[in-house]
Amino acid sequence: MRYDQAAVRVVLDQVRADGRRALTAPEGKRVCEAYGIAAPQEGMAASAAEVVAVARQIGFPVVLKIASPDILHKTDAGGVLTGLNSAAEVEQGYATIMANAAAHQPGAVIDGVQVQGMLGAAHEVIVGAVTDPSFGKLVAFGMGGVMVEVMKDIAFRLAPTSHQEAVGMLDDIAGAAVLRGVRGAAGVNRDALGAVIENVSHLVHDFPEISELDLNPVFADSAGATAVDVRILVDFAAAPARPRPSQHDILRAMRRIMQPESVAVIGASPDDGKIGNSVMKNLINGGYQGQIYPIHPRAEEILGRRCYQRVTDVPAEIDIAIFCIPARFVAGVLAEVGEKGIPGAILIPSGFAEVGEDALQQEVVKVAREHNVRLMGPNIYGFYYTHRNLCATFCTPYDEKGAVALSSQSGGVGMAIIGFSRSAKMGVSAIVGLGNKADIDEDDLLTFFEQDPNTQVVAMHVEDLKDGRAFAEVAQRVSKHKPVVVLKAGRTAMGARAARSHTGALAGNDAIYDAVLRQSGVIRARNLNDMLEFARGLQVLPTPQGENVVVVTGAGGSGVLLSDACVDHGLNLMAMPPDLDDAFKAFIPPFGASGNPIDITGGEPPSTYRNTIKLALDDARIHALILGYWHTIITPPMVFATLLQEVVTEARALGIHKPVVASLVGDIEVEDACRYLVDHNILAYPYATEKPVAVLGAKYRWARIAGLL
Amino acid sequence: MRYDQAAVRVVLDQVRADGRRALTAPEGKRVCEAYGIAAPQEGMAASAAEVVAVARQIGFPVVLKIASPDILHKTDAGGVLTGLNSAAEVEQGYATIMANAAAHQPGAVIDGVQVQGMLGAAHEVIVGAVTDPSFGKLVAFGMGGVMVEVMKDIAFRLAPTSHQEAVGMLDDIAGAAVLRGVRGAAGVNRDALGAVIENVSHLVHDFPEISELDLNPVFADSAGATAVDVRILVDFAAAPARPRPSQHDILRAMRRIMQPESVAVIGASPDDGKIGNSVMKNLINGGYQGQIYPIHPRAEEILGRRCYQRVTDVPAEIDIAIFCIPARFVAGVLAEVGEKGIPGAILIPSGFAEVGEDALQQEVVKVAREHNVRLMGPNIYGFYYTHRNLCATFCTPYDEKGAVALSSQSGGVGMAIIGFSRSAKMGVSAIVGLGNKADIDEDDLLTFFEQDPNTQVVAMHVEDLKDGRAFAEVAQRVSKHKPVVVLKAGRTAMGARAARSHTGALAGNDAIYDAVLRQSGVIRARNLNDMLEFARGLQVLPTPQGENVVVVTGAGGSGVLLSDACVDHGLNLMAMPPDLDDAFKAFIPPFGASGNPIDITGGEPPSTYRNTIKLALDDARIHALILGYWHTIITPPMVFATLLQEVVTEARALGIHKPVVASLVGDIEVEDACRYLVDHNILAYPYATEKPVAVLGAKYRWARIAGLL
């Protein structure tokens, strides 16, 4: 729709001129009207006689509300009276409200009383908007009363939204069914209510000085949606925009940084135990084939490589400079790095913002910006890019090549990634420490990984997003073709942000992160192990071609637990077609259970596993397979593992690529069997029913995000 | 309070005489009054004139409701009108309701119209009662409207409840805060509303023929609680009570069964691969020191033990008979077992109810009851009692002695228990297969484990509870001094379907299971791995002496993730007292973070870990410790592991027993370090932050259940 921006500008200019932070109710109404948001019939009155006159004009029953820039919570102030049916009641009501307001807040400026026509039975909902320091403007939607106040059942989206997204928010809340109508009650007009959300989202986007907005309540019924009360807060001191290179510039720099032809090591050292020595060794022993230039004030050569006093002395182009010198020397050398035209500095040293040395960090950033150098870190372990055999780090070298790129904000998590990757045979393309994120952050990395043919899955440990909106924009694009897993740490910490509005108070830090990550197509991991398992699983598992999941189990008990897990992780246990049911029945004993799960029972020989698994792989109606193996003497763990590997390999040779995950229960030999299967690219877990299903669930979530299902 | 049972009996006798299944509204009101449940002022009317007369007597405004035994959902039938303010409106309303009822359900018997005084603003809540096939009578409580209909926010308790329990139900729902009053609205009178729940619970307990009851709505405000509408359904065909031996008899039999002096093996076999051979070998090789009597129709001896043709031929007392013969022969031999006075039969064979042979199973149960033989199974792997070196099973022998007793309804889960126990060094006292649970079930086992000095923790995999009420009663008692962990399989709708096809079990409604398990003091595991980890952790961890948890971490990133997990698992991160904060500060670098988590930072030597951990163990204000280790060169994994083991051992020597759990992140060496720690009874997990905290959380849950905190 066309919005009347000029009308809003007039109102906001007046508010700014008055030095106010809040709009009056009539101002709020005018702003809403300019953006196509319907309000109830109403008028202002400044005396008992005026109240009666306005009420007569609107028609009884009416609602009276105090109008005061100083009273934000009208109900709490006794400033709202509903269902007034006659001139006498209205007159009396005016006196009551004025008395209540005076008692509640002596000296408050009172503009008068607002008289509104009373709306009939409808759903009371809340539409709001907040400003998040990382994500910027968001719209919020929830149902009034208990659902928002107590259940915190509220949906957020980045503003502005499309009409479709706005309508989609009606389904994002737990109480969504109510809005469709329950037990005979009518549902809401979804288009009309969606339009209110959409219009609010454009309003706050168009006028960033609107910091918070509440339409509470909005009365929504099958005919339309009316904003009964409007509250708008403004903040004219806009936050400065975060500098952001163009996508083209990001990519040009990130390509050279992540896949350098040549590397300088600032502070390279011949002495064991020094970081500058570990980095040199990791570069050399890791098998890096590019040029390595140790920079050292005096040494002639280090580990057989010729040294230079300064980077500017190196007679060739350099792609990255790895800093292994104390924090206080960084800014000075960084200027030389800039002069040399090196596009990336890897700042391993700590001693910056993480220990309160914000000024030192800002100085480094300033030098980098002046010289057009991108910074990774500071306070990081460095990074790995396996497909170049590049270990630009003081940690252990790592060389299991694969397609998962991971980043972490914490060194501890980085080391967990390395250990898990090595142990669980998760091949990686890159592991990147982001540390303080003075410059390069997740969206820069995503922009690189998006086009990196060596990377098919991205997993990120995030403590905060410096520029959440930029991340959301890039993630939304990337997640359509490469899965992005995010572990958001600090999700339970309550944001200490001062919020005066209702919606603002409800925007707990994590509610917003959760909403935006979902909107961005990100697969959220709830803990460290999930992030690692999801990353591995998303790489290993082929993409399912449909929603039909089948469980084949030797242990009925596992079948039940695997089914529970399917429900928990949003997987669809296929309703077995009769002909396929018969086909399975032919392979299993008469007292086994066909249907789904298919319980082949515990006493069966390897051939029963083989036949049923093969059938499930062959039949095109089945899209994914969950196996529950039970250790028996007749089919020991390694026999099961090898037959499963064979059947899957045969299917792959025929071009059949379906996700297969396995839960193995039994004596400790199942651990060896799981290792064997993992070595053959089949995900298998001992003593666990939840994990294999959770990992398959992550793959399904991504397939849906990418529109492949 | 005193209930008027005679008045209820009169009403129910009339309903039974009429052959009805539902009470009329006036009957429902009479029943409620007899049990002290307040109803609004009201009267019945059978004509327009009567309606007006009754309404005048009660006073306007009034509510009209159709009174018909045939119309259960009055609102859906257009049979309810509210807020009628005058004689004219009431007269018109009567006509409307009658017309609506006739249209909705032609031919319905109409007793008239109920006229009720209209209650003021109040919370609308629902109090109800249901009859569960396993748990019997339960009361239910929830808030009206969306919260119950859509959010399924409803609390259940076994009936009858105490007053305190009933009031406690107000806090069991997610929307509990509303009942305490939010944003200026008054809360409810908790005593009055609790009394309604309590009285309903006694009503359905005293009159088991009341199969369902709804008080919907109950209007609750700060003054009291009034049941506005009552619906009561009856079922006079009461289910037969499940036979249940006395606790004394259970214990006498279970002691001999679980700790037998002598064992007969029915169907012992000299042939490798036969179940009767595996059982013999496991008994002998497992090191069982009691008498073993192989029973075989012809053999002289098996594996060096003298054979008998029948158990009745054995010239000594026998405690258990292990059946290794086909299903169809079981009943016959069981009679001989009974004649011999053997108290327990271990029925390994399958081929009973789990494959639809219900009659065969019932026959076996009948024979067992006649001869006073308790049955374990059928369809099981057998059982282990390690402190007697007893492996009464065809699976692998198992001998890691410890204090955890486990049971499983499924053989697959049983094998998972064995494998995990062996691999994770979880010492067990018993592993019991319950299979079809034709007789012995979880409450029999609990009754035994309760007094078994070798058992300190009980963990059970449950697909259904044949007698949920008996289980709840025993669990409530046992859980006060020994933790009881339950993995309820089939908890989701899909899982429940699989449970039915597996053992013929009736998987209960999970909301009811969840409520009763909580009420019983049970720690619920959400999946197989959690059950196993909780069982191990509850055994290994000492009981905390208070709620103050402290996190000490070398990796700030781990500290954040561990804090998240603490919130998830209900652990209380202690607010650090200033003097203790200073004490920690003295040990950590100036840029480390004191407070809680205590971030000692990554570059620290072993002494910093040692000093801070020792301080946390020594200071009596700290009750539990979570460690986040980060792999560095200066403090490698095994160095950390050994120092931690030393510090904990030193503390133990001084009588300091605090729960300590550790998360180790780093390269694969952390796996060895974790194994070393676990070998020394310190729980440690590689690449995971969630699991150690979840396990500590389980210990805390139990300490609270047992009233130790």
Image: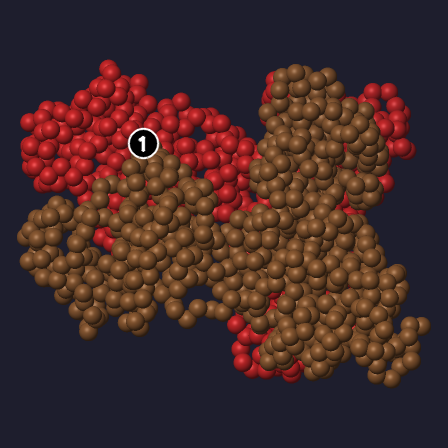
Chain colours: A red, B brown
Q: Quadrant of residue A590?
A: bottom right
- Badge 1 marks a residue whose secondary structure is loop
- Count of marks placed on residues: 1
Q: Note whether B366 is above or below B129 in the view shown.
A: below
Query: Residue B344: in sight, yes or no?
Result: yes
Q: Along the horizontal axis of the image, is A240 left or right of B637?
A: left
Report x, y in % for residue A321.
73, 31
Q: Note whether A185 is above or below B689 in the view shown.
A: below
Q: Along the horizontal axis of the image, is A709 left or right of A296?
A: left
Q: Along the horizontal axis of the image, is B654 left or right of A413?
A: right
Within-10-Å neighbours for mark 1: few <14, some 14–19, many 20+: few
Q: Quadrant of residue B207?
A: bottom left
Residue at coordinates 34% horizontally, 33% vertically from top-left?
Answer: B183
A17 and B562: which is toward the camera: B562
Residue at coordinates 81% horizontally, 73% vertically from top-left?
Answer: B265
Q: Which residue is mark 1?
A: B184
A80 and B111: which is toward the camera: B111
Specify the amino acid type for callout 1.
Answer: Gly
Query: Residue A605: in sight, yes or no?
Result: no
A673 and B465: which is toward the camera: B465
A102 and A410: which is toward the camera: A102
Residue at coordinates 51% horizontally, 66% vertically from top-left?
Answer: B241
Q: Along the horizontal axis of the image, is B491 left or right of A539?
A: left
Report x, y in % for residue A538.
64, 55
Report x, y in % for residue A470.
51, 38
Residue at coordinates 22% horizontally, 52% vertically from top-left?
Answer: A223
